């Protein structure tokens, strides 16, 4: 006889039918008690003293839009909410998940800087192509974020994606069979396939990185191809609330102790390009790592940050640097854009809070109030509490978005 014959009736079905409320909440409590009896769990926080790890403090810095940013964001939010409401009214939320994902991404970009929406890579027309314009496809544009792909890979239907963008798209999808955002056929893609990025002249790039002393680490002395910096007028460019909050925090840190090193994480590489440009002009020596770089470039940049004291700020794309990095030379982390899966931020924090770290750790989340970010933080807390209540091992479950979660983000 199967001793777990009660599983479906007492735990599985209530959770499937009621989520974490009512009978579902009772089922989660039962599941938690069961796991407590059969599973040994030792977290890094619980064993910090045994491991010799320094304390870790997480804080949230909350700012508000300036008037220009608020007008732009309000317009974008109103339009996005109208589209989402129409999907709800038609009962077609599942059919438009790719569109909804794009709406959320645009709002997150707008919070960081309006230029990330207004200065997106344009699509070349047939007439422009005839005049010699670069074909959009040759630049490996991600079909989700519509910017130059980081760590690009291709689906079976031949469309290109940032590896982490399509991973998040699949993880968060509420559809059983997610559709390709470009052609809307069932999306089939191997997330472990080799990167499509063409080979670079690594020797020259690595040499430039290792010999640089100005903090202006750029391939061949040029801004990365496709960078947003090439599409704006830097003479009239205005910073954003989010960027200036970061500059203020780093300025205070530099005045207190110029030897402290910091890591700045963002999921958007174009935002890191803007941050990089702003920080170098504020006198910070910065390194930068993202998915557009080859393994040789990555290794050279990491070595530079770890070994050269003048480089105090490391800008890292979460798509490229969320895992498999040991950066214990830094003791401060700034998370520029929250994600509803708390495991993503935990991985970023672990880049510095690990064996070999001797300084106290401080993590700062930069959040703009009255935006989608404050809602994401609330959703993140909800999912984290759900995870802790069952002490589950599958962190991908934290990234799943229900239709109710989407309504919460759009405040319906």
Image (cartoon, rainbow, N blue to C red):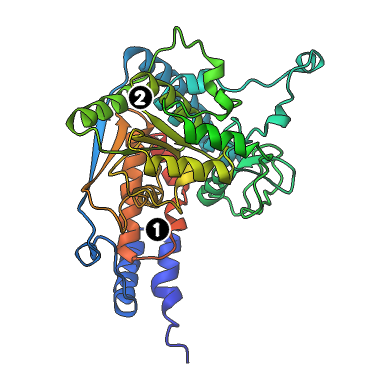
Q: In the shown orientation, is residue 278 left or right of residue 147?
A: left
- Looking at the image, is mark 2 or mark 1 nearer the viewer? 2
Residue extending farthest to the top is 236
Compared to residue 25, the image places residue 342 above or below, namely: above
| Label 2–label 1 contact, CB within 8 A | no
x%, y% of residue 110?
Answer: 44, 24
x%, y% of residue 297?
Answer: 55, 40
In this figure, which residue is indicated by the disc labeled 1?
Answer: 19
In this figure, which residue is indicated by the disc labeled 2?
Answer: 243
Compared to residue 295, the image places residue 47 above or below, namely: below
Q: Residue at x 61, y 53 (%)?
A: 191
x%, y% of residue 246?
Answer: 31, 28
Q: In the shown orientation, is residue 154 left or right of residue 112?
A: right
Q: Residue at x 42, y 54 (%)?
A: 398
Please rate how many residues cluster around mark 1, counting C-alpha atoms within 10 Å: few if below 14, some from 14 to 19, many from 20. some
Q: Is residue 357 visible?
A: yes
Compared to residue 317, the image places residue 139 above or below, namely: above
Compared to residue 16, the image places residue 165 above or below, namely: above
Describe the element under mark 2 as helix, strand or loop: helix
């Amino acid at each position: 006889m199967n001793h777990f014959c009660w599983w479906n009736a007492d735990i599985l079905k209530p959770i499937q039918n009621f989520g974490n409320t009512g009978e579902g909440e009772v089922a989660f409590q039962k599941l938690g008690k069961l796991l407590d009896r059969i599973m040994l769990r030792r977290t890094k926080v619980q064993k910090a003293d045994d491991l010799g790890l320094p304390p870790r403090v997480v804080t949230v810095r909350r700012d508000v839009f300036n008037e220009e940013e608020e007008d732009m964001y309000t317009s974008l939010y109103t339009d996005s909410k109208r589209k989402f409401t129409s999907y709800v009214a038609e009962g077609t939320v599942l059919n438009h998940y790719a569109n909804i994902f794009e709406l959320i991404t645009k709002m997150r970009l707008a919070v960081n800087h309006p230029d990330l929406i207004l200065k997106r890579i344009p699509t070349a027309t047939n007439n422009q192509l005839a005049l010699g314009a670069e074909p959009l496809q040759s630049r490996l544009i991600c079909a989700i974020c519509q910017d130059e792909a980081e760590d690009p890979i291709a689906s079976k239907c031949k469309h290109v994606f940032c590896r982490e963008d399509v991973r998040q798209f699949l993880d968060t999808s509420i559809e059983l069979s997610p559709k390709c955002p470009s052609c809307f056929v069932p999306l089939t893609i191997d997330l472990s396939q080799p990167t499509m990025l063409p080979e670079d002249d690594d020797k020259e790039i690595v040499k430039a990185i290792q010999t640089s002393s100005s903090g202006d680490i750029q391939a061949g002395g040029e801004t990365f191809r496709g960078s947003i910096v090439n599409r704006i007028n830097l003479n009239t460019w205005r910073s954003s609330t989010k960027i200036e909050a970061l500059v203020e925090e780093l300025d205070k840190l530099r005045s207190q102790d110029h030897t402290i090193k910091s890591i700045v994480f963002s999921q958007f590489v174009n935002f890191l390009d803007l941050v990089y440009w702003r920080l170098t002009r504020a006198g910070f020596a910065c390194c930068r790592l993202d998915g557009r770089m080859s393994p040789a470039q990555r290794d050279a940049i990491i070595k530079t940050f770890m070994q050269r004291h003048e480089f105090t700020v490391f800008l890292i794309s979460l798509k490229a640097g969320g895992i498999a990095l040991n950066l214990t030379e830094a003791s401060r982390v700034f998370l520029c854009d929250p994600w509803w899966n708390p495991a993503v931020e935990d991985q970023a924090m672990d880049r510095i809070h690990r064996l070999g770290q001797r300084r106290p750790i401080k993590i700062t989340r930069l959040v703009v109030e009255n935006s989608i970010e404050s809602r994401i933080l609330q959703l993140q807390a909800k999912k984290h509490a759900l995870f802790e209540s069952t002490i589950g091992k599958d962190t991908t479950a934290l990234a799943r978005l229900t239709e109710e979660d989407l309504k919460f983000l759009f405040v319906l």
